[in-house]
Image: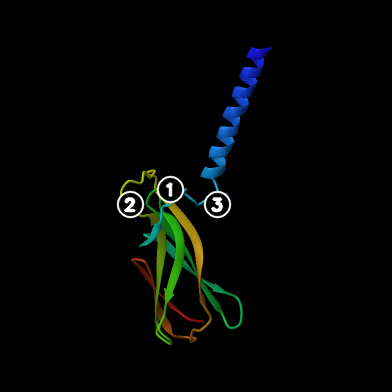
Amino acid sequence: MTNRRFWRGSLLAVLGLLALSLATACDGDDDATPTPVGGEREEVEAPVESFELLILESFPPQYNVEIVSGLPNGCHLFERYEVERDGSSTDIKITVWNTIPIGDDIACTEIYGTHAGTATLGSDFESGTEYTLTVGDLTKTFVAQ
């Protein structure tokens, strides 16, 4: 009987430790990589794989950009889009930002991933005017509707 209690207690202890390690490693965010305790992150520009301009059927037309950006290894996390346009300028630049842990002693899985998302450009476009859209190193032109 004592032997049975020992094994039952050991099994419960192992299951408890497993549950604790899973709870600390996963925070429910599918794109998240655990950051080391006390670890800070810094922003780095993300590589851009592709993008597509979407013109929504509304009045006035709304413009969005679907972007596929790279996550060069398991430590890279998508952070944000930065849209730059000076007033009525016809040049629009979108920069995609990832974050990475600060420090050289961080082990990262060397698996290239991607992030797909949408950046909003709004509706402030003059119909018939040609615009240049640059996302990362990729550039396309379009004529506003």
Q: Which residue is at the front of the view, 92 or 35?
A: 35
Which mark is first along the chain, 1 or 2?
A: 1
Closer-to-camera residue (19/62): 19
Spot the residue most to the front: 2
- Circle 3 sits in a helix, a strand or a loop, which is it? loop
Q: Nearer the viewer, mark 2 or mark 3?
A: 2
* Residue at mark 3: 29
Residue 42 left/right relative to 80: left
CB-based contact (under 8 Å), mark 3 and mark 1? no
Q: Residue at x 44, y 64 (%)?
A: 51
Which mark is on residue 128? none
The residue shown at (35%, 55%) is 102
Q: Amino acid at mark 3?
A: Asp
Location of the N terminus by quadrant is top right
Which type of secondary structure does the marked residue at label 2 adopt? loop
Mark 1: secondary structure:
loop
**Mark 1 Cα-neighbour bin, 10 Å: few <14, some 14–19, many ≥20:** few
For disc 2, the marked residue is 103
Disc 3 versus disc 1: nearer the observer: 1
On screen, residue 70 above or below 130: above
| x then y, percent, for residue 108 | 38, 45
Of the residues shown, which amino acid type is indicated by label 1?
Pro
Are there few (<14), some (14-19), or many (20+) residues within 10 Å of tag 3? few
Q: Amino acid at mark 2?
A: Gly
**What kind of colouring is applied to the model shown?**
rainbow
Label 3 and label 1: CA atoms lie apart by 16 Å
- Sequence-wise, the earlier of marks 3 and 1 is 3
Cβ atoms under marks 2 and 1 closer than 8 Å = yes
CA gap between label 2 and label 1 equals: 10 Å
Give the residue at mark 1.
36
Distance between mark 2 and mark 3 Cα atoms: 23 Å
